[in-house]
Amino acid sequence: MWAYVVRRLWQMIPTLLGVVLLVFVLFNLFGGDPAYVLAGKISNPEQIDNIRRQLGVDQPYWIQLGIFLKQIVTADFGASWSTNEPVSHILATRLGPSLTLLVPLLIIETLVAVGLALAVAYVRGSLTDRTVMVICTVGLSISILVYIIVFQYVFAYKLGWFPVQGWGDSFWENLVRYASLPILIGLVVSIAPNLRLYRTFVLDEINQDYVRTARAKGVSENRIMWVHVLRNASIPIITHVMAALPGLLIGAFLLERFFSIPGIGREVILAVERSDFPVIKALTVYVAVATMIVNLLADLMYKAVDPRVQFE
Amino acid sequence: MPGAACNGTGGEGAQYRRPALATLATGVLVVLVWLALAAAHAAEPRKVIRDVFPAAETGFDPAAVHDLYSAGVVRAIFDTLYTYDYLARPAKLVPNVAAALPEVSDEGKVYTIRLTPGVYFQRDPAFGGAKRELTAEDVVYTYKRVLDPKLRSPWSFLVEGKFVGMDEVVAAAKKTGTFDYARKVPGFEVIDRYTLRLRLTDTDYNLPFVLAHDALSIVAREVIEKYGESDGRTMSNPVGTGPFKLGEWIRSNKIVLDANPDFRKVVWDFAPVQPGDEALVAQMKGKRVPAVDRVEIYVQEEDQTRWLAFQQGELDFLNMEGPLAPNAIEPDGKLKPELARRGIRLDRYVEPEIRYVYWNWLDPRMGGMGKAQIALRRALAMSYDVAAEIRVVLNGQAVEAAYPIPPGVVGHVPGWKSTLTYDPALANKLLDRFGYKRGADGWRTWPDGSPMVITYASRPDTLGRQLEELAKKSYDAIGVRMASQRDRFPELLKIEKQCKLASREAAWIADYPDGDNFMQLFYGPNAYQSNNGCTAIPEYDALYKQSARMPAGPERDRLYMKMARILEYYAPHRLTVSRYRNQLVQPRIEGYRRHPILTSTWQYVDVAPAGK
């Protein structure tokens, strides 16, 4: 297994280089010139040149690319061009609020979606199954923006069950008081598509011979569903959940913006609006690295879940 | 089994003990919560006001920040030599840390400034624990710093080329990479601890306005040297002499300002000017500034969030801009009755800004002084439906701009009648007459017969698209085919500053309340800088040069009127609107009046006593 892990780690280097090249090319082609924004209301060409020189964007592309690579190796992306805040500080301080929102959301969403998927798959074809599927279809046809606007208006403003917005200093206050409504909205939005997907994974398994055999042996239905079927359906579920993990680094920018959560999602949008390349670079690289590591972990987990899986 | 219960052993005994333990635990919890609440209550400042920014701040270095919201915080933490009377309209300059307005001599080339003794910076480790007084040397250091190329201040244009001897210092800094702050120059003469003399390279009667700008807020050298970042900016450690100091700061989310305990004694003393000011003066006169202990500022980008939070009382102030306005404001500009019944107040005024659609003067087909080009621009200007922009795009939250200097700015002419009005029929006739003929398909051609297309640039957001649609409708009405150029703001700005953008609606808001700040927008030599359309009309430029050397007054106003007519004749642009600012204020806030120039005025408000 270790040989496999080492090989996969080596493979990450060319992949990361590809990502770096893509980000670099895209930013330089479409990213806009930050010098003109940073120069303020009245600027002359000399001032623009001065800013470009200080930011290093006047250098030949190959030198800029070299600096980018050096930043990745040293994990030092410098400071934001707009605020002068070190990029490492931005990531360190904004990641916490995003994770406070997204980790509980991912856990609850996975548990609920898997549980419901097993239940509706068990009664497939019934009125309950069809009703749930119709609700899911309607649910996922509605934009998250609608959910946010309606839920914020009804549950926070009209009913007063939650604060309209806010974020405090205490983790528990943030989790219980401020993140509850965003998490609820996140659940409503994400459960529908996941439930439909997981249901198909379960249905693929539920008609297999081993299920019929277990029933013939007198194994309880609960055990068949929660142990035998779930275990076999878990590989695609793990793939799906693990694929969502790198997204935690990006945050949920709409939820963060509407509920004033100082997370990484808001920061990404700000960085794009400001053409703040150091922040964009750092986030892109971290998300790429996280995606590759999570993919590796997912592959390792397949082996843990299903011993038939062989690493080659 | 009763026996088991009595001897206190076994399962049932444990069940009997649980309520007692639970009660004890609950009691302890209640006490702890109560203590925590009591502590929180005790620690909570007496008077807190809550404001909101619709965009994130960038930092608090006066010379480095250039967004309105960061500037508001800078205004609260730092002091400038001069400021504006809180209630006077149009805005009136008054001394701040200067003892009086400057003594002007040598035809506006020499300014002598005396500082008020006893103005102290807030306590900070940068001063080694000692009280640190603001002196004339601090003022000189501050002004020099804005010119330091390393800092790349977006406000350097305010002072660039103005002070005798500074051009050489700046040139040397560019060459060596080190700015020589110690070098004496005739432009900045420190006479004594509290007196300095500024010598200008040319007559400039607007200098006091410049010295009241947020960017020239006075900083202490020790602070900059202690906290300065690699590029010399000090975005995170603002230490000033102003009424507030930075407390808690969660970047892009929450900024807390606490009253500065070292702030000098300033008493609220302003005279009423507008209707409603009397009551405000009665509430505030004689109070110590700042009257509140804390300002909490939240960053909320979404309109709905701000609006709901304000209605729930989580915010004390809210600017009802753009699509938000109809929620609170009737078409006649009055506050909706349901809000008025709740005691919410509306503070409404026209922003000191102009918006204008320009056509690139350097474009060989549209620009320049040729008669056909003038006719084309005039036709385009007359085809533009400003009333529709106000009604449809801006939800009625603007007034038509007829004069290049907006209301509230010195030099504005109320009731000015522009010769460029909405008249598509006349525009069509003008185009017909100057050879812009309609082809078989109904679209016009250039005089040489080639297909005519005029490009209009806009941002890919809602406002940008709406403005683009309006421009297209206007051009369609006169048979001019319009091409769209949608790009992000930085990119549009870049092309614009290179004088390569064909046309777009630009905006300018006052840096200081003097007409010069607007008339310079169309001055030829300011092309590639603030003159977005790169207009160059020799007649206008000659008059502008003349006006720039004149103090404000009827003589300069007459010159400005002449210049306005020249602009109307050559039509390098079409003035469109000046927007309203609609500020909602909760009933518990006393003394609030939005100022057209000051970026923040938290120090002048108070919180009504409970129950009032």
Image: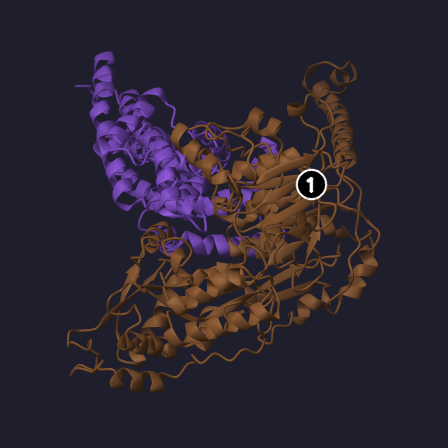
Q: Does residue B68 lie above or below B444 as drawn?
A: above
Chain rendered purple: A
Nearer to us in this view, B40 or A139: B40
Count the labels in the image: 1
Q: Does residue A83 lie above or below A130 as drawn?
A: above
Q: State the SS at label 1.
A: loop
User: Quadrant of residue B595 in the image?
Assistant: bottom right
* Residue B566 visible within the image: yes
Q: Position of residue B27 (x, y in %)?
A: 78, 28
Chain rendered brown: B
The residue sitting at the front extreme is B106
Residue ID for mark 1: B242
Q: Residue at x 24, y 34 (%)?
A: A61
Q: Position of residue B312 (x, y in %)?
A: 65, 55
Q: Residue at x 26, y 69 (%)?
A: B454
Nearer to us in this view, B604 or B271: B271
Left or right: B521 in relation to B428: right
User: Quadrant of residue A211 in the image?
Assistant: top left
* Residue B251 visible within the image: no
User: Quadrant of residue A63 in the image?
Assistant: top left
Q: Position of residue A208 (x, y in %)?
A: 22, 35
Q: For label 1, count other residues whose C-alpha is less than 10 Å away and answer few (under 14), some (14-19) or many (20+).
A: many
Which color scheme did the rendering employ for the protein?
by chain
Quarter of the image with the N terminus of chain A in it: top left
Left or right: B290 in relation to A195: right
Identified by mark 1, the residue type is: Gly
Quarter of the image with the C terminus of chain A in it: top left
Nearer to us in this view, A227 or B593: B593
- Chain bearing tag 1 is B
Nearer to us in this view, B296 or B360: B360
Q: Position of residue B122 (x, y in %)?
A: 70, 32
